[in-house]
Amino acid sequence: MDGWIQILVSGLTVGAMYAVSTVSLSLVWGALNVLNMGQGAMLAAGGYIAYTAVMSLGLPIPIAIVVAVIVGALIGGAMYFLIIRFMIGKEGFETNVIVATFGFALILENLVLRLYGAYPLRQPIGLEGGWYFGATHIPYQNMLLVVVSGVLLVAVGYLLKTTQLGRSIRATAQNREATELMGIRISRVFLLVLLIGGGLAAISGIMLSTLTTLAPTMGYDPMLKAFIICVIAGLGNIYGALISAFVLGLFEVSIQFIFGVRFGFPALLLLVILALVWRPYGVFGKRKTERL
Amino acid sequence: MKESSTNIYRRDAVIGIILILIAAILPFVFPTRYVVGQMTIFFVWATVVSQWNLVFGVAGIFSLAQMAIFAMGGYVTGMLGLYLEWPLWVSMFFGGFAAVVFSVIIGIACLRLRGAYVALLTLAISQTMYLLIITDTACFIRQGVTCRNFTGGTRGLARFGDFGFREMLPYKYMAFGDYFLALVVLIFAVAFSIFLIRSPIGLAFQALRDNSNCAVARGISRFKYQLLVFSASAFFTGLAGAVYAGHFRVMGANTLYLNLLLFLLSMLIIGGVGRVWGPLLGAAALMLVDEVLKEFVEWRLAGLGARQHAGHPRRRRQGLRRLRQGFLQDHRRPHHRRGREERLRHADGRSGHGRKKTVRSIRRFHLEWCHRHHTRAMRPTLDRARREISQCQGHPGVHRRCQVRGRGR
């Protein structure tokens, strides 16, 4: 019994980790068709900035988080001005953007490596203590993670669904050219989405680094999982991503518990492939009709 | 038609023979081990990129599994050499076949999907392979006191021998064996890709890429043809993996690093996706840049990133335009040049050769039609509308048209 509660708790935590790293990716993909390979490095950068703000500058924790979000948004903006601006609407956009954002990620990662070194650091932001449920220890940090990931995803979903900005973002996602013909500046939508995406990535980075440690490459694994979750949810589907993240987190942890840690990820992948054979546009995705 | 198709091949053949001659003379001009070794690696990457180009550029499948297929070829070759003690000359072909089988499995899993879904899933598959290899710690065989695991784990698979050029060739020319082996594999790979691109099947791929709905409506099975090109391109990729393993005498999970994958992808993109000779040029260019940047080890990776930025289409087009016009061949051009009537006449003229041939050539005509009429037909109208809008954005309310649209955010 205790074992299963433990699985449930760590499954939810892992699911929340996935969900939290999926938010920004899902937003940027859904709105811009930009597969942001720089996501992993942006997560790491967010964690490190918060670390610097607390440890070196001595800022209180809430302000440190705000600083990290602002700097994260600036990184997203830099990505727009340095790379994506030049590629919008060009032939082979989706492909080139993958390579270019990966280049950006390499620069960012090496910058972090040079500034902080490869030695893992401990993230000072985080809640201490926990709550005992029977014999199972549930750290407050894990609960916070579940809550924050849920709140972020719902907030982004709300932003996309109801606001004016959200409407223009969705219009851009559906048909870039038609949106442009309606008088919406595509370039501004791109910039705003990347700013928001950068800020969200910073929050995700802080949340992730509180559970593990800070390392320049800490973002890669969450990024890969986030990719998979985006795919299974249907690319750009935010609420679908929330559900998939938790389901897959629980599934992976159960497999790891039953068959061994090695097989968690392969089993996850197998499940995803089966799900996609069943529904090629993602479990929550809608089939797009194409006009000839 | 006969005339023009021989022309196409003649041009490729001339370029090919010149390049082969240069490659054959090069090691005798610069006989240092370093140059020969780097060129060998270049041939291996060029082989991979030329086959990737078939999948990615010609068939338009956004696959990132190429290095997984490459690693499969290398690992199977190494394992056959290590566990069954087969000579590498035999096992390399089995490595190639294993790569084909592997890629058919990946293809069945992924090719029902489209676009970025394929990219993400294939990336995930290659990362899974990486994770499974580096977390492999179970004992498979014992060699004395040391315990070896099945895949070699983080240390890599070793001790499966090499191609035996060390014994065959005098010391001075030792490195030449691998060099020419890699070159031969590259030549076959490129020849294969040229024939595939120019063949009717190749036309089907291109039609699927440019206007898949149109092609499907004209009786091309998307899944079948994409699976075909996906598995066909795997053989030489696997063979390249085998040559890589034999050259370094070790096969490690480092071939599955994301950095390497993206390095090869940028070769493909900078060289020109979907062209015959472009990927080779891209591979050569990036190998050279990499060589230069090695001097500045600390900033090498950052430079790699910057270089990939330089690969974005606008700058790329400026830089390589002249080269491309003169030297690289756009495979689309021949189809554009030939008139529609001429091809219709051609389809009729073939009726004497039997019904099957006529049907095939009519199908060919239809596919060329798909190939040409992709969505870009809309471009001029759109451009005009966009110009009008941009005028309006500066001066809202000047034109009546602008007032209506001025409400947009």
Image (cartoon, rainbow, N blue to C red):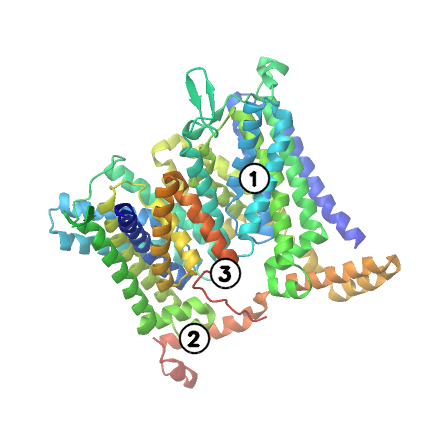
Q: Which residue is mark 2?
A: B389
Task: Give the CA distance from mark 2 to mark 1.
Answer: 45 Å
Around disc 2, counting alpha carbons within 10 Å, would you say few (fewer than 14), some (14 to 19), or many (20 or more)? Answer: many
The amino acid on which the numbered mark 2 sits, given as a three-letter code, is: Ile
Please tell me in which quadrant of the rendered image residue B217 appears: bottom right
Instruction: Please provide percent x and percent y for residue B148.
Output: 45, 24
Q: Amino acid at mark 3?
A: Arg
Are discs 2 and 3 located on one and the same chain? no
Q: Is residue B131 left or right of residue B30?
A: left
Q: Residue furthest bottom?
A: B400
Q: Residue under circle 1? A: B48
Q: Of helix, strand and loop, which one carries label 2?
A: helix
Q: For the residue carrying disc 3, how many other residues have a C-alpha within 10 Å: few (<14), some (14-19), or many (20+)?
A: some
Return the residue at label 3: A279
User: Which of the two marks, 2 or 3, is nearer to us in this view?
Assistant: 3
Same chain, marks 1 and 3?
no
